[in-house]
Image (cartoon, rainbow, N blue to C red):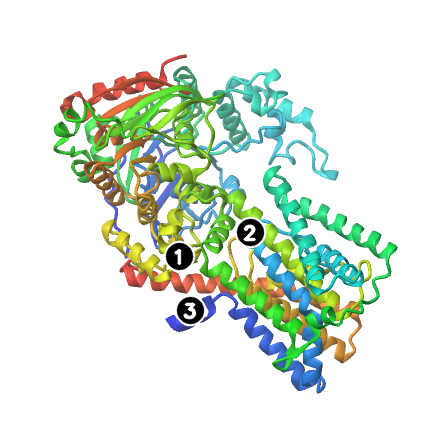
Amino acid sequence: MNASTARRAASPPGGTAVPDTPLLRLRDVQKSFGNVRALVGASLDLHAGTIHALMGSNGAGKSTLLNVLAGLLEPDHGSVEIDGEAVTIGNPQRAQQLGLRTIHQELSTVPDLTVLDNLLVGREKESGAGRFGWLNRGRTARQLSDLAAEFGITRLDLATEMSRLGALKKRAVEIVKALASEPKILVLDEPTSGLEDHEKEALFDHMAQLRRRGVALIWVTHHLDEVFRLADVATVMRDGRSVATTAVAELTHASLSRQMFGESVELLADRPAARESGCSSSLREVPALRVHGLSRRGVFKDVSFEVRSGEVLGFAGLAGSGRTEVARVLMGLDRADRGVVEVNGRTVRYRSVRSAHRAGLAMVPEDRKQLGILGELTVAENISVSRLRAVSRAGLLDRRKENALAQSYVEDLRIKTPGVSAKVRNLSGGNQQKVVIGRCLNTEPTALIFDEPTQGIDIHAKAEVYRLVRSLAEQGAAVVLISSEISELLTLSDRVVVMSRGELVGEVGEVGRRASQDEQSVKDQIVALATRAA
Amino acid sequence: MMPGRRFSRLIGTDGAAIAIALLLVGALFAVTVPEFAAVGNLRYFVAEEVPILVITAAIALTIIVGGIDLSVGAVLGLSAGVSLWTSMSGLGPVPSVLAGVGTGALFGVVNGLIIVGLRLNDFIVTLGTLNVAAGLLVVLTGRIQLTGTDDDAYVAIARTPLLGVTTGILIAAAVAVLMHLLLRYTTFGRRVRATGLGVEPARVAGIDTGRVKFLCYVVSGSLAGLGGVLLASRLNSVQAAMTSGYELTAVAAAVLGGVSLAGGRGGIWQAVLGALFLATLRQGFRLLGVDPMIFAMITGLCIIVGVVADRSLRDLANRLTLRDTRRSIGVAQ
């Protein structure tokens, strides 16, 4: 099944003369993991001296494509050409030889080593180490200090431990480290994540400088505004395909987001009906979840909010703003130093996660693979695990009961699985997430916390998760939704609160009832709150 | 031509590989060494392996929960000593059994408290308590000659012939069966597996992983204690260092049986089959007159080969299962 991709010819940026053969050409690259087709057909032409944005929502296949380029994954199908010659990347060392360097979103530097030692890793030969494995720090410093200075890394910084640098400098070290091997192609995965606004500006300067050097940049980002500021060409991926490649000059905000979300945009944007009744009648009710003055030293402080039955409260904020940490305390995974949590007016006494479950709290955690599913266990075992008492007597499991319970969730949540005794590991991401949701529902929660519930799942599964979140609220659950996608928050929430640096800094009310033309202003408001200086 | 679903299920069954290997090795020795299959020999050699079988079940449990209890061998020896000493003091069979099992349980509690309470590494902590137990046995055997009790009831615990074998063998078999049931059919067992697969996701799912782990160490220690009682009862004599190295044989047996050192994967009976496999090899080589040193080397090689074979089979089974899964939910190939 060869997916023919809808590619539009990329017109050369800025009208400058660009050789006909692209520096890098990907054709119909495909990759599956078990049952999940992460890349259905990705194609891309990259020219020297351009900044080529690679866009797409979570689960669009960007990271898989990046891993192919980094030599970490072998594609199942398709070709990779560099300078018109077909190549096999195979492993990261080979990628480097081919002039391909990737700067991953997660930093690859070692925090306890100095900047210089981090730069030395992988270039021991050039440093003249060679024989006996002695490291020649002096030579490396001489070789790289000019380059480092160009990216704001002083000689003093070179002797500093990585862990003591700020976010921007850490990125800069990664860039210098990558440039030291003189790559022709540099892949940047969300390089602005975790950077302050002024740091982003500095990073953009660095990127423009790379373009001047003639390096071809593949820049993965989901910030439309940044793309319009800096990129020359944008390739949009959706559901594992590259759906369009367009010169940025020919794009508008609207056309780009249409490319990103496609026809599904309506499905996702459609707002729940019957919001009015849910909010107005509940004024006198005790809130389903009330959090007051919750603090955890050094992590977040004085967090207070209420969620009513039938209400979805969105939590906006940057990564590291403390949202997940609040959720962990609510679930009894971490302890609060101060503050009260009440469910239906009763104070929760935390001893373990089980006490949170018993009080009526349940959480769909972030990072499904690490924290959510127990991949080696079956669907049934994953669903029952939070409340084994319901499927056992005197400590003995009743398999028939367990399977029947799981079967009912498989049907209710429309989990696509060959059966309840299939290992969860073998399901697709969206279905794994639904299994985790089923597990939470099985604890019969009053309040449900969703932490980045659509991370890494495809757009159709995403739509289904949206529908589930909504219908759970309609059935009377109080929902806390933590998400880094503002559009997701706006689509699902009644109110959105914003966290920044461990504090609740503001609230944007009644987002569900605003007309859609207000959406941009609401977004701007949220972003302003989330990023305001301390 | 791909093999069918039944085949994928067979080789995907945990323990299939070790069961086949055990049968093959057993058959090989039965044909080549006439004495091997003689009933008396067989019974004797299985009886000799009883302590190893019991601590294999124990160590498999702690490996599956995501840790490892290296102290089982030494604790088994110490418990044997304490139990025999109690019996020699004339306290009767019941207190002697309790003393042995209690010694093991005490070590289990200590291991569990240190590992869970202080969040220390399982390997290091139990390596420490291994040496403590071994040292205590040296002290004990240095003070008192543990060379036999007059209590016939005590000796009868492991030695009484029953159903064609001995009570010791039957008790070991019962331990294996019970441990298997515990792991597969109880809520505790489910929590053990979940914890072993990942402490964090298990905690998020509401499992008190610390408690689960602690209990596993207590069970492990108690089993080592029971193994010690069976050893002392059968030999009616305990010397220092007589059980040194048992823990490594048990780890090897568990791993051969497909218990993953990463935790969460594998089962008790597969581990016990691994122990029987190693025992069969040892007995066969002994009858063939192979130098014990060479035997040790061959055992080592067997472990590595066995683990590689087990993993290859597992990969193959996973691929086949995945294909079946794809078919049944209608995903295009």
Callout 1: SS = strand
In the image, are marks 1 and 3 on the same chain?
no
Q: Look at label 3 and name its amino acid.
A: Ser
The amino acid marked with disc number 2 is Ala
Residue at 48 percent across and 25 percent down: it is A171
The residue that mark 3 highlights is B8
**Number of other residues with Cα within 10 Å of mark 1, as a class: few under 14, some 14 to 19, many 20 or more:** few
Nearer the observer: mark 1 or 3; the answer is: 1
Residue B43, position as x, y percentages in the image = 68, 79
The residue depicted at 66 percent of the width and 61 percent of the height is B226
Name the residue furthest top.
A534
- In this rendering, the label closer to the viewer, 2 or 3: 2
Horizontally, is A472 left or right of B159 in the view?
left
Q: Tell which subunit mark 3 falls on.
A: B
The quarter in which the C terminus of chain A is drawn is top left
Taking the image as shown, residue B192 lies to the left or right of residue A414, namely right
Name the residue that disc number 2 marks: B262
Q: Residue at x 48, y 36 (%)?
A: A101
Dot 3 lies on which element? helix
Quadrant position of the N terminus of chain A in the picture: bottom left
The relative height of residue A531 versus residue A403 in the rendered view (above or below) is: above
Label 1 sits on residue: A393
Q: Position of residue A289 (x, y in %)?
A: 30, 29
What is the distance, in whole Å, between disc 2 and disc 3 at their CAs?
Answer: 24 Å
Q: Nearer the viewer, residue B105 or A259?
A: B105
